[in-house]
Image (cartoon, grey):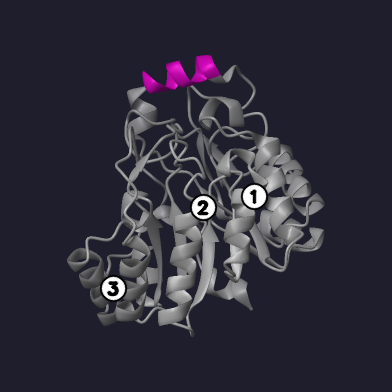
Amino acid sequence: MGMAVLQFEGLSADCDLRLCYLCTMKNNDARKRQKPDWLKIRVPAGKQYIAVKDVVRRHKLHTICTSGQCPNMSDCWGRGTATLMILGDVCTRSCKFCAVKTGKPGPVDGDEPRRVAESVKLMKLKHCVLTSVDRDDLGDGGAAIWAETIRAVKKLSPGTTIEALVPDFSGEGEQLQTVIDAGPEVISHNLETVRRLTPVVRSVANYDRSLEVVGRVSASPVRSKSGIMAGLGERREEVLETMDDLRRVGCEVFTIGQYLQPTRKHWPVAGYIRPEQFREYEEKGLAMGFRFVESGPLVRSSYHAEKHVD
């Protein structure tokens, strides 16, 4: 079966990625190409959405929903699920696909765990996804704040389940174990893309190191999860190979959705993957043994995250 994709001129999955990046950045027609109908986003609405938005604004919370320009914000907030970003909103890495700011982060806010926990309680979240920027400037990569935040949320909202969407902690197993020991129901670490594209679109991160992180989680009592983006220039067989790699290390939940270029300075979209291709990835993933597979154009790592606890 050939890959179902709307491929842009100027970027082919078979050519040199560095050259393709430069060529496509100059290709205004590709950047301005109208998105297909299946990528149209619903306008935010609903009482639950408004309530969550109000708490986020009043408490000056960082959310990946807004920083990452997530297309599912209305859906998730309306279902009582939100993704809160801890350790600031400035990342020490500069991945070419990511909309989060990069630079020198400010000092760690020791009061953040309490504020996040109180906000989760105010929002009456059924399921909370916690994520963070990379903090390579910190000796523990931010692991201590991660653990404190998880414990604080569990103390104030014992009925709220938690997914921790963690960085790679530079491969330091002790730091990851600190998060595992805090007891979230799910720990997710995204591969983001296939092996071939990792060196050119991810900053600092390493494909095999990320697999090791997922494997460590899989070996623990916590449910493991990972995901990638489609439309960066990967081939269908590379996606299936990545899924095989994740199953080999015991990953239980897999997500894949369409990459959308945040700004003109970011990695260009190589093509829009058709819904039928995403359906095939879902079928293949379930056949491989994943417990859950979220596969679709608008899927993001935290999409339907509350289901992955069951």
Q: Which residue is mark 3?
A: 52
Magenta-tinted stretch: 18-26
Answer yes or no: is residue 158 visible.
yes
Residue at point 63%, 42% (across, down): 172
Q: Nearer the viewer, mark 3 or mark 1?
A: 1
Residue at point 31%, 56% (across, down): 62
Residue neighbourhood size for the residue with mark 1, other residues' Cα within 10 Å, grouped as few (<14), some (14–19), many (≥20):
few
Q: Is residue 24 magenta?
A: yes
- Residue 288: give x, y in percent of width and height: 80, 58
- Residue 233: give x, y in percent of width and height: 57, 32
What amino acid does circle 2 point to?
Answer: Ala
Q: Are marks 3 and 1 in contact (CB under 8 Å)?
A: no
Q: Are marks 2 and 1 in contact (CB under 8 Å)?
A: yes
The single residue placed furthest to the bottom in the displayed view is 159
Q: Which residue is mark 2?
A: 143
Left or right of 116, for residue 278: right
Q: Quadrant of the N terminus?
A: top right
Magenta-highlighted stretch: main secondary structure? helix
Answer yes or no: is residue 280 visible.
no
CA distance separating discs 2 and 1: 9 Å
Residue at point 53%, 61% (across, down): 164
Q: Secondary structure at mark 2?
A: helix
The foreground one among 199 and 76 is 199
Give the mark nearer the N terminus: 2 vs 1: 2
Number of dots carrying numbers: 3
Q: Which residue is mark 1?
A: 174
The single residue placed furthest to the left in the displayed view is 58
